[in-house]
Amino acid sequence: MAVQPIPEPAEAQPYDNFIRGRWAASVSGRTAESRNPADNRDLVGRFALSDGRDVDAAALAAADAEKTWSSQPVPARAAYLRKAASILETRQEGFARLITREMGKPLAESLDEMRDTVNFAYYVAEEGRRFFGKTIPSEKPGRFCYTLRSPLGVVGLITPWNFPVMLPAWKIFPALLAGNAAIFKPATETSVVAAWLVEVFEDAKLPAGVLNLVMGRGDEAGRALVEQPQIRAISFTGSAANGWSVAARCAELRKRVSLELGGKNPLIVLPDADLDLAVEGAAKSVLTASGQMCTAAGHLLIHRDILEEFTERLKNRVARMKVGPGSDPAVEVGPVINRQQLERITSLVKGAQDNGAKLLSGGEALEGPEYQAGNFISPVILTDISPEMPAAREEVFGPVALITPVDSLEQAIERANAGPYGLAAVVYTRDLASAMRAADRLRAGVIYINGPSSDAEPHLPFGGAGSSGNGFRQGGPTMLDEFSEWKTVSLDSGAAAEP
Ligand code: NAD
């Protein structure tokens, strides 16, 4: 069936919550604004601000819907997801434009995000016919033993703003395939994109209450989701500080929680590396989504033998990258999400300089009419870094490269593993033994060798080690683990008693 593209959102009309298959204002009636980070005068839309009462209504709706949804055959559930995938595919260009307008990343990156999301959505739908358990031989006569996955019930899905379609899709599609009903709480910054995404499931005729949308702030709607007694599990993607505090509360409440958190991701370049590839890969790893990527690798550990040449080439490459609104096709670096984040990045850079770091390029306020109303910062390269600097320890989440020389692969691995995080790591080398040694020894959930950390494949497992996560993986063959319970069945057929 041909699906009409969604019209551009009407600016004045607020985006509501979606509960029990209906769009409705929050109980309090409060709303907030979402604005374009490239031009703060552009109001993308108003959206509902929710509290515990909205979460309670959504939990009730989800608990009702879950009873029938969980008892449908898995391929039947998958059929709704396939329909949603095909609607997403039809609307991907409109979505990409909206992502760029509401989140700020260049249009080409938004299109990549949509392509990956559509592929992922089809992949999950296909898994509906591969919802396998195991048969396991029993040690007792006449017994038949097998395992099957059962759903958890009602699950809460909490997501950040940097990949506003892909990250919710990583949760919604597997959660529903597994037979759960879900409540989705997006980041406030990308609420309009979230409403469009939920509309896709409405248009796919998903039964009412199976997917609910509750918009609002983390310390209000998000907190209420964690506290709500009918919600059995929380799937959280966001900052480490918030994620671990949500996990601590979930432990008290005996809820399952899965965490996909931030990182401080290293990028190692060894002297035998293809330098063209490494420079290009570093530019992408540092600057995709203006560095607002959980796998952004701004912690550059460069072998001393090639330090000067690599640094010079990276500086030249970055100087050629156009900064500006993501809607301009020539732009490679868009704005950062908001003023607060802009100030945080600037102060981390200044703090590093005050403590002896050398600013090689960037960091200056950008002059020109196209920059006046946006949150722009030119990409920063810093050298002479010491490990104690907050910029060297904390996730910067901005367009900042910190270059540190290393004398060997061993030293690079030691530096890379020194912090608490363990999300992604990148290595550039032509030497197979070094590549394999690095892959073996680096503490990271995702390792890229000779490619940038901005790459993602929908069917590869994704998640972090150390304080970047708690062991679950999104995407790939283990994606259903966070949303289902393994059940072991031991069935005595009575056959052993027969003569
Ligand atoms: P954030 O932690 O501020 O917010 C993430 C989500 O959690 C939002 O929806 C927010 O409203 C909600 N939230 C905040 N406090 C909460 C609380 N106490 N209870 C319940 N919900 C709460 O993160 P952000 O600024 O939106 O996103 C950036 C962070 O996300 C970065 O640290 C980045 O590395 C991380 N991230 C991780 C991954 C991954 O897969 N590992 C992917 C993308 C982003």
Image (tube, rainbow, N blue to C red):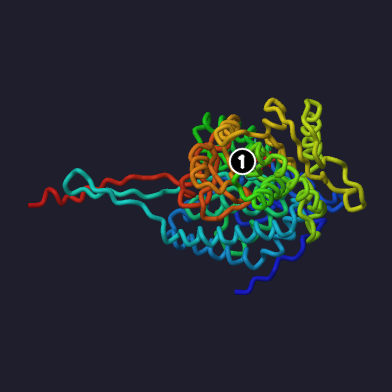
Figure quadrant of residue 352: top right
Looking at the image, the residue that sits furthest to the left is 499
Q: Is residue 54 above or below residue 166?
A: above
In the rendered structure, the answer to whether residue 283 lies left or right of residue 478 reads: right
**Horizontal placement of 351 versus 275: left or right?**
right
Left or right for 477, reference 39: left
Instruction: Evaluate whether residue 246 shows in this view.
Output: no
Point out the residue furthest to the front here.
305
Q: Position of residue 225 (x, y in %)?
A: 61, 40
Of 352 and 161, nearer the camera is: 352
Q: Is residue 476 above or below residue 119?
A: above
Q: Position of residue 248 (x, y in %)?
A: 56, 30
What residue lies at 61% left-to-right and 43% top-to-bottom? 271
Residue at image mark 1: 268
Q: Quadrant of the N terminus?
A: bottom right
Cβ of mark 1 under 8 Å from ligand 1: the answer is no
State the count of labels: 1
Judge whether 15 appears above or below 30 on screen. below
Label 1 sits on a secondary structure element that is strand
**What is the crowding at mark 1: few (fewer than 14 residues within 10 Å), some, or many (at least 20)?**
many
Between 347 and 406, the one nearer to me in the picture = 406
Quadrant of the image where one finds ligand 1: top right
Q: Is residue 59 visible?
A: yes
The residue depicted at 59 percent of the width and 29 percent of the height is 418
The amino acid beneath tag 1 is: Ile
Left-right relation of 311 to 2:
right
Q: What residue is at 49 percent from the left and 33 percent from the top?
A: 254
Looking at the picture, how far across and down is residue 193, in whole percent?
70, 54
